[in-house]
Image (spheres, rainbow, N blue to C red):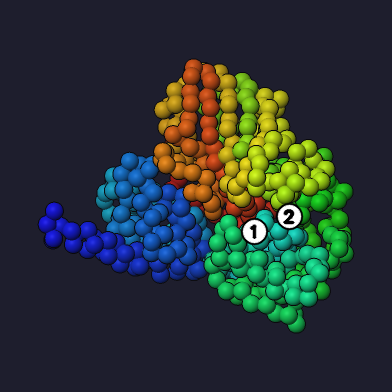
């Protein structure tokens, strides 16, 4: 290879970097001015680095068998920036691929594809001027609580209409309690550092994260807080303690002044609706004051099970969950009220029970009584896997099922819930930070007649937290149309 040819590789790379750099201000302006969330085949590109943007484009080759260049998407962004768009989720990667296939005038193409939000900025701004942001309170500040905080803070810059106003915790024993809370938000051994700045207001008992003033309230019970004294009213409380799971316990939140609704980040008991966003969130009504976002595993498997049942029919099956250890387990052998969970989590695989398979029926009644389930806790801190061993009503092949699930991940109404990967080298750590409920591993799919085995990865912390926020958005009336529409619509 000649010296000139070698230099050409570097020249091509720097040109791609320059193009990606030109995209960043357009992405930011569309987000902050227009409330337009841009992505590339489901990979959000807001607040991303040059390398992250290039990597998102590179991902397209896994699902389209061809690469997508930043040179293809930059003109899409430039044209969108001039169209005075209203609020929307717009996948510029899918638009670019479709435009390359169709050609023609770019502006006219965009008006066809995203027409309902073209020119809607002024009308939306007028409507927003009469609206108030929806107050959100995190009750508990553990693993899920801190990730919910990260997502809410990240989205606040786009006029999301959800505003994290407070976190409620029990007073810790340390004098520097606030600093410790801030440090846990700032540094995370699994998900890395907080993307921004955090300062502590000792006098006001608050954290200031990326300009968001978050009151830290100390309380020993859900019904013992007067939120209105902090200027918080009509708030949605996200209870991520897991301590109260029935209507009586969670109803205590509604006795505190300033609270209008409650959502639990664990499976609810009794008649509480267990919501898996994308599956049964259409059952949420204004009268529902207490809801559950089900469990991480239920969120991971239900969308895939629905897709398979709709297309092929599920007779019965078994779900085996290979789940990362959780804070409920012991670091070293010690007493635990649960069977086997007292044994050291970092040193053992631990067989334990899971209600996820039965819980699927609460979101997807047609599968009631058809699934059994079990779980194995393994010595990893995050990212889990569900193995779906299913008996179907018709014969299938692995290629057929993978093609179908790939289409569902890219173009269906479940595209935010189902992701798809087709690489022989992926391992669990590759999915840390995934915002999809579950990711189908195409290379592991097994099909033999009517029997199908699917392997579904999921970030049991971050992917689940993203699903919770989607529920809260709907409860608050904050919804975004998604473009482009799927071809079959």
* Kind of element beneath mark 2: loop
**x and y percent of residue 78 in the render?**
35, 64
SS state under label 1: helix
| Residue at the (72%, 49%) spot, across then down | 332
Instruction: Name the residue: 70% across, 79% down.
Output: 201
**Proximity of marks 2 and 1: CB atoms separated by less than 8 Å:** yes
Q: Which residue is mark 2?
A: 240
Residue 276 in sight here: no
- Where 399 sits versus 484, above or below? above
Crowd around label 2: few <14 · some 14–19 · many ≥20 (10 Å) = many
Q: Is residue 253 left or right of residue 267?
A: right
Q: Report x, y in % for residue 159.
A: 57, 67
**Image height of 37 relative to 351, above or below:** below
**Which quadrant of the figure has residue 238?**
bottom right
- Residue 226 location (% of width, % of height): 84, 68
Q: Which mark is residue 381?
A: none
Classify mark 1: residues with Cα within 10 Å, few (<14), some (14-19) or many (20+).
many
Residue nearest the observer in this picture, 35 or 437: 437
Which of the two labelled residues, at mark 2 and mark 1, occupies the earlier sequence position? 1
Q: Which mark is residue 148?
A: 1
Q: Quadrant of residue 221?
A: bottom right
């Amino acid at each position: 290879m000649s010296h000139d040819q070698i230099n050409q590789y570097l020249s091509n790379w720097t040109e791609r970097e320059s193009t990606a750099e030109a995209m960043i201000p357009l992405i930011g302006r569309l987000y902050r001015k227009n409330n337009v969330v841009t992505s590339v085949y489901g990979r959000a590109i807001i607040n991303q680095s040059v390398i992250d943007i290039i990597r998102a484009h590179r991902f397209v080759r896994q699902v389209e068998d061809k690469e997508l260049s930043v040179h293809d998407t930059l003109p899409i962004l430039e044209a969108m920036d001039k169209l005075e768009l209203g609020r929307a989720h717009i996948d510029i990667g899918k638009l670019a691929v479709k435009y390359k296939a169709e050609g023609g005038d770019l502006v006219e193409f965009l008006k066809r594809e995203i027409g309902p939000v073209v020119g809607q900025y002024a009308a939306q701004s007028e409507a927003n001027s009469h609206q108030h942001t929806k107050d959100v309170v995190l009750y508990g500040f553990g693993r899920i609580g801190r990730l919910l905080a990260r997502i809410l803070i990240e989205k606040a810059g786009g006029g999301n209409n959800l505003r994290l106003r407070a976190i409620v915790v029990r007073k810790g024993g340390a004098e520097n309690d606030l600093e410790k809370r801030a440090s846990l938000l700032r540094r995370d051994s699994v998900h890395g550092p907080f993307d921004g700045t955090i300062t502590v207001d000792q006098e006001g008992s608050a954290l200031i994260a990326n300009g968001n003033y978050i009151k830290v309230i100390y309380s020993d019970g859900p019904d013992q807080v007067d939120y209105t004294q902090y200027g918080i009213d009509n708030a949605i409380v996200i209870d991520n303690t897991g301590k109260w799971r029935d209507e009586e316990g969670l109803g205590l939140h509604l006795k505190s002044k300033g609270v209008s609704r409650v959502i639990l980040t664990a499976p609810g008991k009794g008649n509480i609706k267990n919501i898996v966003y994308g599956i049964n969130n259409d059952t949420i009504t204004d009268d529902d004051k207490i809801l559950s976002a089900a469990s991480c595993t239920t969120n991971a498997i239900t969308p895939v099970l629905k897709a398979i049942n709709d297309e092929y029919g599920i007779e019965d099956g078994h779900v085996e969950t290979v789940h990362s250890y959780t804070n409920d387990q012991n670091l070293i052998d010690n007493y635990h009220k649960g069977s086997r969970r007292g044994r050291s989590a970092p040193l053992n695989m631990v067989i334990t029970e899971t209600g996820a398979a039965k819980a699927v029926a609460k979101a997807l009644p047609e599968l009631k009584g058809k699934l059994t389930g079990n779980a194995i806790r393994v010595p990893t801190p995050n990212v889990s896997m569900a193995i779906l061993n299913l008996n179907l009503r018709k014969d299938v092949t692995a290629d057929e099922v993978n093609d179908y699930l790939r289409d569902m991940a890219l173009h269906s109404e479940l595209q935010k819930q189902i992701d798809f990967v087709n690489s022989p080298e992926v391992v669990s750590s590759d999915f840390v930070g995934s915002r999809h409920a579950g990711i189908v591993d195409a290379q592991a799919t097994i099909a033999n007649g009517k029997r199908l085995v699917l392997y579904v990865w999921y970030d049991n912390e971050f992917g689940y937290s993203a699903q919770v926020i989607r529920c809260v958005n709907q409860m608050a009336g904050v919804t975004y149309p998604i473009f482009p529409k799927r071809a079959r619509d």
